[in-house]
Amino acid sequence: IYGGSLDSILLELGVCDPRTLCELLSQACGLPVVRVELLEPSVPRPWEQMPMHLVEIGWVVPLAMDGETTVVGVHPDLPNDRLGELYRALPHVEPLVTPECCLETINAERTRSVVPQRYAVLFASFRSALRQRPSVSDVGFPIVNLERHEDTAAGPAPAPAPPAIPPP
């Protein structure tokens, strides 16, 4: 483990699969998650639309244009005040929470630099997994149950999710 953001560490440790990580990031940040097709290197990136002071911190990258809307990848830890700056700077913006390895790869595209090996490996694995494997929650095994069952007349409450780490 080499530090970095929690999403990178979770992927490195294999604690959860990339789809589940995306679901958890979306729930935690309250934003939709990046779509795999936006991570392709052939997608034109509207760098000229971006406020450079936000791009330079490395936690905000343009992903694509969708009509007049700038689709932007944002780091899960982007502070709310910076997200507010983004909304004020781009009147038509769609922020998508994007794992650190993806942001690093797209930033390397912009600067025409080499992606650090750690992020290159994570990115390749992440993108491949999103293209192929369903999330565990897609097959009916909820990792995080966010539903509130205050009305017991609606039926029995679902069983609690099993622990993330099985007991010894």
Image: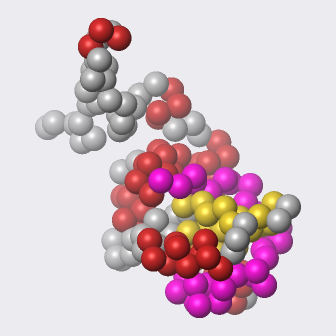
Which of the 4 quarters of the picture holds residue 74?
bottom right
Question: Image check: 137 left or right of 130?
Answer: left
Residue 102 at least partly seen: no
Q: Residue furthest left?
A: 168
Say above or below: 33 vs 159. Answer: below
Give the residue displayed 30% in from the left and 23% down from the top. Answer: 149
The answer to whether residue 34 is magenta is yes
**Residue 19 location (% of width, % of height):** 53, 46
Give the residue displayed 41% in from the left and 28% down from the top. Answer: 141
**Residue 91 location (% of width, % of height):** 70, 71
Say above or below: 153 vs 114. Answer: above
The magenta segment is 30-58
- Residue in the foreground of this view, choosing between 128 and 163: 163
Which of the 4 quarters of the picture holds residue 8?
bottom left
**Residue 85 location (% of width, % of height):** 55, 79
Say above or below: 61 vs 8. Answer: below
Q: Quadrant of the C terminus?
A: top left
Q: Which color scheme did the rendering employ for the protein?
A: secondary structure
Q: Quadrant of the N terminus?
A: bottom left
